[in-house]
């Protein structure tokens, strides 16, 4: 299983409560672009409309600019493939106050391209500071251990 693109800001800005694996409806050139790391999940989230889940604000740049269709939109909404139980759970959680569904990473599962999404609660500023503080202290400890 190979990770292609990760949304590092998702772990910094949100507390991930539960994760799901979803397939995504993509064009062939979009799959090639994701596998070539020409995509971004910054600011990407999931909305549920009409009993279907859609990935919004995920940008997939053209794989080959000359061969892409003229009407291609890099940040269009893409349909997610989930089962009914998962959709119902995601819909209930997205309606709760303070919860959102964020895209975490693109990865390869066997021959298929999958998207990891998570139900998340936004962190407060103090929580973000605490995350930075623990990261810095861990880095300092690792640096000291390496030098000895």
Image (cartoon, rainbow, N blue to C red):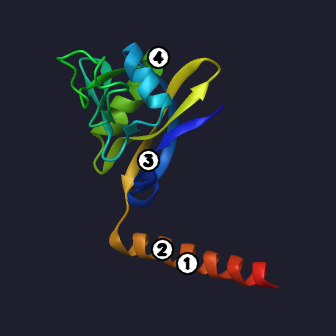
Give coordinates of residue 40: x percent, y percent.
Answer: 37, 41
Question: Closer to the N terminus: mark 3 or mark 1?
Answer: 3
Q: Which mark is residue 7?
A: 3
CB of mark 3 within 8 Å of CB of mark 4? no
Residue where numbered disc 1 is placed: 136
Depicted 69 relative to depicted 97: above or below: above
Write the residue at 38% across / 22% down: 30
Question: Closer to the N terminus: mark 2 or mark 4?
Answer: 4
Q: Secondary structure at mark 1?
A: helix
- The alpha-carbon separation of the residues under discs 4 and 1 comes to 41 Å
Q: Quadrant of the C terminus?
A: bottom right
Q: Secondary structure at mark 2?
A: helix
Residue 128 placement: quadrant: bottom left
Badge count: 4
- The alpha-carbon separation of the residues under discs 3 and 4 comes to 24 Å
Which one is nearer the viewer's eye here, 54 or 51? Answer: 54
Residue where numbered disc 4 is placed: 83
- The alpha-carbon separation of the residues under discs 2 and 4 comes to 37 Å
- The alpha-carbon separation of the residues under discs 1 and 2 comes to 6 Å
Q: Is residue 42 left or right of residue 131?
A: left
Question: Closer to the N terminus: mark 3 or mark 4?
Answer: 3
Depicted 95 relative to depicted 97: above or below: above
| Crowd rating for badge 2 (residues with CA inside 10 Å; few <14, some 14–19, many 20+) | few
CB of mark 1 within 8 Å of CB of mark 2? yes
Residue where numbered disc 2 is placed: 132
Residue 29 placement: quadrant: top left
- The alpha-carbon separation of the residues under discs 3 and 1 comes to 20 Å
């Amino acid at each position: 299983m190979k990770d292609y693109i990760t949304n590092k800001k998702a772990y910094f800005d949100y507390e991930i409560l539960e994760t799901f694996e979803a397939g995504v409806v993509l064009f062939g050139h979009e799959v090639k672009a994701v596998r070539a790391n020409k995509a971004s999940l910054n600011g990407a989230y999931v909305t549920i409309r009409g009993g279907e889940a859609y990935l919004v604000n995920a940008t997939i740049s053209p794989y080959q600019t000359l061969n892409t269709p003229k009407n291609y939109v890099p940040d269009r909404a893409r349909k997610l493939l989930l089962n009914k139980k998962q959709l119902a759970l995601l819909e209930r959680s997205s309606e709760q106050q303070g919860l959102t569904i964020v895209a975490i990473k693109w990865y390869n599962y066997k021959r298929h391209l999958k998207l990891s999404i998570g139900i998340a609660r936004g962190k407060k500023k103090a929580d973000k500071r605490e995350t930075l503080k623990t990261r810095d202290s861990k880095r300092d400890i690792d640096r000291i251990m390496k030098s000895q």
